[in-house]
Amino acid sequence: EDARLPPPQNISILSTNMRHFLTWSPVTIQGETVRYSVEFQGEYEREYANESWIPIGECSLITATVCNITEDISATVAYSLRVRADGGARRSEWGTLKGFFNRNTTSLTPPLMKVTADGYHLLVELEDMGPAFQFCVLYWKKGEESRMQQKMVKEVSSTVHLDTMEAGREYCVKAQTYVDTINRSSSFSQAQCVRAQGDRSVWL
Amino acid sequence: SGELYCSLPNPRNVHFESTNMKNILHWSAPESAGDGVLYNVKYSVYGVGKWIRKPECRNINRTWCDLSSETADYEEQYYASVKAFLNGKCSDWMETTRFNPLTDTKIGPPTVNISSTEKSILITLTAPEKWKRSPDEESVSLLQVYPGLRYNVSVLNKKTKKRWFFSISNNTLVVPWLEPGTAYCVSAQIHVTTPLLHSGFSKEYCTATLKDKTA
Amino acid sequence: SEIRSSFTAIKANIQARDPVRTLSILSHPHSLHRVQSSDKCCIIHKVFNFYVDKVFKHCQTEDTYVNRKISSIANSFLSIKRNLEQCHIQNKCLCGQESTEKFKQILANYEGLNVTSAAMKSLGELDILLDWVEKSR
């Protein structure tokens, strides 16, 4: 029987902002296209379903060496992942990720944010990072860092009203992401400061 | 026993269309059936053993039937079924998928009332009411059906063309420190997180802040 | 909401596999919605255990997409079951007479069908469970 293909090596996970990718090193055979298939196993499958594995349709017999597993890593439990190679008439053993992957280890980055003033109104626009994300927005009058105010914002990619501002004062804003399914937050973004419209006395 | 010979093509696409829990059964006529087709409708509560005929939808020629009253308890789930008759022939009973009024209804936009002063506008929102059998029946707001209901409010400054959004859970919003003598347009949407439902945005309602008396 | 979106993705497929309209596991003869608030935590704990221990393993289908969504729901239930166990350990989730009776009824409904039909019916009734759990939050 021909020698089996070597299993894929260097299997690892790249996970940022709740988007998870499995990657591995390519298996090469002279003159053959090698294809890969990925399967996952959650804690449920290990403990209640005879350690069964579930194929990921989008990563069956693919030539790429990366697979987006985000949709399947949809619970905060420990997952196992494995990859095998097919080339010509030969197939490798499964290469399995060392250890488990739990999405609560994803790295969270501060959100992109745009702060604007419209008259006396402090506004913020936050990037859309997906349904799992909320944003904790802190804002304060410049120089009064001890009197920060907080607002949880879920709306994204639209201009959200934070508060009204004192005439002529400068206000600063910073934000962090919060993911309640893993109960973790990112670090805060850089603060952005804007100035309210000038003297209000004209309207009093 | 006068059993009809059921070789008529079946009604198609039998499904519920629901807005604010006004639940209407709809279907399409059997293929190439021509005119004169009549229909009977029945429904059942999921988990309960019997089909119940809808007398008002017996031998009807229209292709819808209002089952709002029969499906008013949104803690239950339902099936409905339609049978077609033509020239002594009939079709099979054709069923809906399981209908869950709580998750399968569309939510209408809130009503928006606005008033303005020189420097602010007051926005008052009212969530739609759940369908009710008669005008004198007690009204149930969708706020009571969906405790997590919130409003997304959009405020457009017609001069600067800038649009701001507010997300609120109570039904009034005061937007202060606006520019005098400026037109603002407001529209609002309902958003429920569990189950995930949202209405479209309401029509836009515009008002202008009063002119600055001192200017 | 992740469970809800996973279930919504396969609801029509799963419910279509349950031809028995006249029986329910969760909602008849006693509705979850009639449970007293003091017993809710205990019933939620028991029902989540029931799904993890008994239901999901019998819900394999020929459709890999459906199986992936069932796995997603099962692993989410396992994660919640773990959290609920903490409540149970700290005596915050006490089981009264009513919840014991109610859960007995659910098991009786379940055992009244063959295991695959019962499991598929239970899975198809997840929105009944979620509607009730979310209402009582």
Image (cartoon, helix red, strand yellow):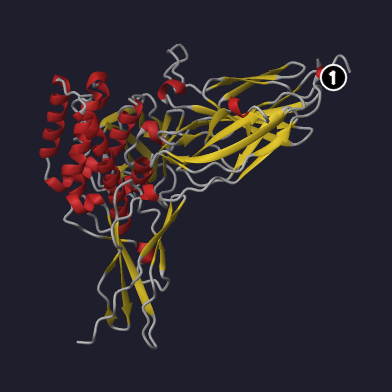
Of all residues shown, which one is farthest toward the right? B215
Determine the residue positioned at 33% across, 65% down. A38
Q: Quadrant of residue B187?
A: top right
The one of B15 and A9 positioned closer to us in this rendering: A9
Callout count: 1
The one of A43 and B183 positioned closer to us in this rendering: A43
Rendering coords of residue C46 (x, y %) = 19, 32
Determine the residue positioned at 25% across, 21% down. C34
Q: Is residue A28 left or right of residue B123?
A: left
The C terminus of chain B is located in which quarter? top right
The amino acid pointed to by label 1 is Val
Q: Is residue A118 left or right of residue A136?
A: right
- In which chain is the residue bearing label 1? A
Is residue A158 visible to us here?
no
Determine the residue positioned at 50% across, 41% down. A177
| Element type at mark 1 | helix
Is residue A104 visible to us here?
yes
Q: Which residue is mark 1?
A: A202
The vertical placement of B109 against B2, above or below, is above
Rendering coords of residue A133 (x, y %) = 48, 42
Rendering coords of residue B213 (x, y %) = 86, 14
The vertical placement of A64 against B85, above or below, is below
The one of A45 and B99 positioned closer to us in this rendering: A45
Q: Is residue B96 left or right of residue A18?
A: left
Determine the residue positioned at 36% across, 69% down. A10
The vertical placement of B200 against C95, above or below, is below
Q: Quadrant of residue B200?
A: top right
